[in-house]
Image (tube, helix red, strand yellow):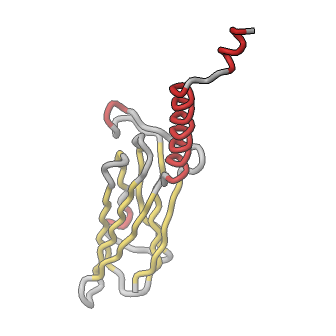
Amino acid sequence: MYSLHLLLRASPAALLLILCLQLGTTKAQEDTTSRQLMTMDLQMLQIDTSEEATVVLEVSTDLRECMVVKAYLLSNIPIEGNFSYKFTSCLCNNYPRRFFWDLQTNSTVRITAVVDVIRELGICPDDWAVIPIKANRFSITKSLP
């Protein structure tokens, strides 16, 4: 009977340990829900009143692991120049990437920046990269007057 009484009696140290473990678990669960898989910012810089413009896409992630990403542009009308360039890069949480395209247009154009998470070797250090299960294509659209 005495041994059963010892098992049921919790010491203050054990209670403190259980409390700390519970708080640590709650904090870890909060961190995983607030992280963003991909954040994109698309800027279009028109040079004075000319037909030339620069499109800047900044991509970042809150994931702890790196991803291999391919960025490219789509438009509602054909555009010449380096508009068709596709950039492949390693995206990590502490190193956002910026991609630049220069283009010429004499009309209003809707541009969509697309970022695909792909599987390709030789891009990230030691080929350590992840591919998300939820989504692997992200896009953002803006108009250039």
Residue appearing at x 40%, y 67% in the figure: 41
Residue appearing at x 52%, y 29% in the figure: 17
- Residue at the limit of the structure toward the front, as seen here: 2
Measured as percent of width and height from the top left, residue 91 is found at: 37, 48
Measured as percent of width and height from the top left, residue 89 is found at: 35, 48
Residue 24 in the figure: left or right of residue 67:
right
Measured as percent of width and height from the top left, residue 13 is found at: 51, 26
Q: Is residue 136 above or below residue 82?
A: above
Q: Quadrant of the N terminus?
A: top right
Q: Nearer the viewer, residue 144 or 36?
A: 36
Residue appearing at x 53%, y 55% in the figure: 137
Residue appearing at x 60%, y 48% in the figure: 134
Q: Nearer the viewer, residue 4 or 94?
A: 4
User: In terms of image quadrants, where is residue 72?
Assistant: bottom left
Q: Is residue 81 above or below residue 67?
A: below
Residue 123 in the figure: left or right of residue 12:
left
Q: Is residue 13 above or below residue 131?
A: above
Measured as percent of width and height from the top left, residue 135 is found at: 57, 51
- Residue at the limit of the structure toward the left, as seen here: 48
User: In terms of image quadrants, where is residue 10?
Assistant: top right
